[in-house]
Amino acid sequence: WDYHVIVIRTRIHDENATTTAKTTQVLDIDTLLPYPCQLEDYLEGSFPHAINNHEELDPNYLPLFRVISAQSYLNNFFSDRMHMFKNGKWSSPPPEYSPIMKGLSVLGAEKNNSGDGNSNNNSKSNLEVYINMISGDQNDDAEQNENDLEEREGKVFSLDQFRARFTACRE
């Protein structure tokens, strides 16, 4: 696969009146690791070479993570799953639930309101937006449309950035 989708669940716990603890778990139904799995255990189990030797590896082969909120994903993503259908058959059986298509109606409304001609009217998927891991540098002074884009499409993190963002202990 060119991509893999996981869910990150972060919980803040009050340990006592003055301190709190952060627990981050990965929910991945396709892993052989425990479900749910603590984030650090998941990263070490899934990317052992990148965790332990990333200075020695070609940067082109290091994992990247696109982080997007669940609500934004459900509101903006759409795919008819045809990327999984080649030569008259499915590369893997599709899930039994209906494809996520809500984002297609959102895109249609935006195009009608904005006159934006950048999108393909015949597209039944915006999957490429999410698996494309090239991300422009954005800063706090970014224009509103860039912030809206990041809200819809998420933000790309390197392995080190991802660990720092979601783990309690920052190395």
Image (cartoon, rainbow, N blue to C red):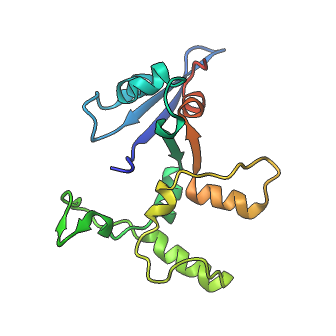
Q: x, y percentage for residue 1?
A: 32, 49
Which quarter of the image is occupied by the C terminus? Answer: top right
Residue found 72% across the figure and 64% down from its top: 145
Question: Compared with residue 123, is residue 96 higher up or lower down, i.e. above or below?
Answer: above
Name the residue furthest right: 141
Task: In this rendered view, identify the residue nearer to me: 37 or 160.
Answer: 160
The image quadrant of residue 33 is top left
Residue found 60% across the figure and 81% down from its top: 111
Question: Compared with residue 101, is residue 163 higher up or lower down, i.e. above or below?
Answer: above
Question: Compared with residue 79, is residue 154 higher up or lower down, i.e. above or below?
Answer: above
Q: x, y percentage for residue 52?
A: 46, 19
Horizontal side of 141 relative to 88 (left or right) equals right
Residue found 67% across the figure and 52% down from its top: 136
Horizontal side of 78 relative to 99 (left or right) equals right
Question: Compared with residue 102, is residue 147 higher up or lower down, i.e. above or below?
Answer: above
Horizontal side of 37 relative to 91 (left or right) equals right
Q: x, y percentage for residue 46?
A: 36, 30
Residue found 38% across the figure and 51% down from its top: 2
Total label count?
0
Task: In this rendered view, identify the residue nearer to me: 56 or 162.
Answer: 56
Q: x, y percentage for residue 14?
A: 56, 21
